[in-house]
Image: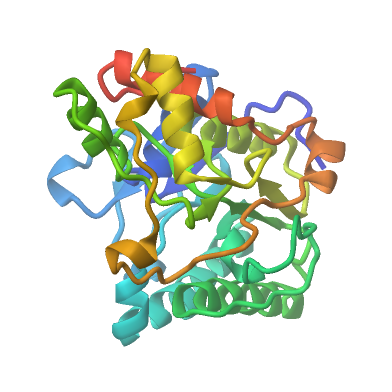
Amino acid sequence: MSKEDGMGKFLIVGADGFVGSALMKALAVKGHEVYGTTRRADTTGGRRLFLDIEDYDSLVIPPGVDYAYITAAISNYEQCESDGRAYDFNVRVLPRLVEKLVGAGVFVTFISSNTVFGGETPWPEEDAEHVPNFSYARQKADGERALRELLSDAGRGEDFNVVRLTKVLGRDTSPLPGWRAAWRKGEAVEPFSDLIFSPVSRAYVAHSLLTIGELRIAGNFHLSGADNVSYVDLAKAMAEKGGVDERLIVPTTSTEKGVRLAFSPTYSGLSMARTTRLTGLAPQTLHSVVDDLYREMAAGAEVVF
């Protein structure tokens, strides 16, 4: 159920991160009281709380906080493949942290990924079966399952939701800085035509998570781009927006460049049928993503809402 005024106190676990920092700003701009955790002990104070997430029992929840977002995770694909600590963090530590928060009366949003669906089925719905096919995806799927088991056993299955994201872009997300640098010098870029994704902007994700938080509805939600596109499509949209000569885009493939892709889906986009019905949020078009990226660039890396 949603709060009557939507103005509870929020906690962001991972407030220094790519999504967490933008979400913290979006909540503050909307007038919410928001706290964030950080592992940088020298930056704590006020509403910045120190937390080593692996020591989750040490978290002191600020009085009045009744909603939390778990934006922290180990998401580097190579680290998830080679470092056993990544599995422990994503599958054991984070669900236990959620269990602690829910046990204290806090509703929780747990951030997950489109990779849990494997990328071979177009537009999987919010309650579709998981078919992960590489380490990071399996860890996100196992983390979701562990979370549900913990909270179901405690009779708290209606006190959290899972929000899965497609690829989130900001102005400094690779390969965008390299593209901009090349275009400034009049040089061509070589985006991959065989790398398919369904991008969303950091601003869109922050705004959407804010909306989901104000509504506080249990279950699964998706935030996705409106189309499955290639990096060539993104480069062309950015060039058009920025007045860049399209001849400075020379498509190539990962195979031609000898690049091994850990996740190379046929389909990346997620169905948002349930999400749209319950929240009013719609998938983000590619042109909207590019508009947000240019606003962020103009603002000097600040996310603009």
Scheme by which the image is coloured:
rainbow
The structure residue drawn at horizontal position 34% and vertical position 46%, both measured from the top left corner, is: 17
Q: Is residue 163 left or right of residue 152?
A: left
Point 56% across, 80% down: residue: 133
Residue 89: x %, y % from top left: 39, 75
Q: Quadrant of the N terminus?
A: top right
Measuring from the top left, give residue 279's x and y in whole percent. Answer: 79, 35
User: In front here: 291 or 248?
Assistant: 248
Of 109 and 140, the residue lying toward us: 140
**Going by the picture, which residue comes out furthest to the front?**
247
265 relative to 231, above or below: below
Where residue 235 sits, quadrant-wise, is: top left
Q: Position of residue 164 (x, y in %)?
A: 62, 55
Residue at far right of view:
277
Q: Is residue 4 left or right of residue 44?
A: right
Residue 163, x across and y down, in percent = 64, 52
Total numbered circles = 0
Can the viewer see residue 106 in this picture? Answer: no
> Can you say whether 148 is above or below 196 in the image?
below
| Picture quadrant of residue 161 | bottom right
Q: Is residue 275 visible?
A: yes
**Relative to the observer, which residue lies in front, 157 or 164?**
164
- Residue at the location (69% across, 28% down)? 6
User: What residue is drawn where x is 58% and y is 31%?
Assistant: 286
Q: Quadrant of residue 44?
A: top left
Q: Going by the image, does 145 lie left or right of 250?
A: right
Above or below residue 230? Residue 39 is: below
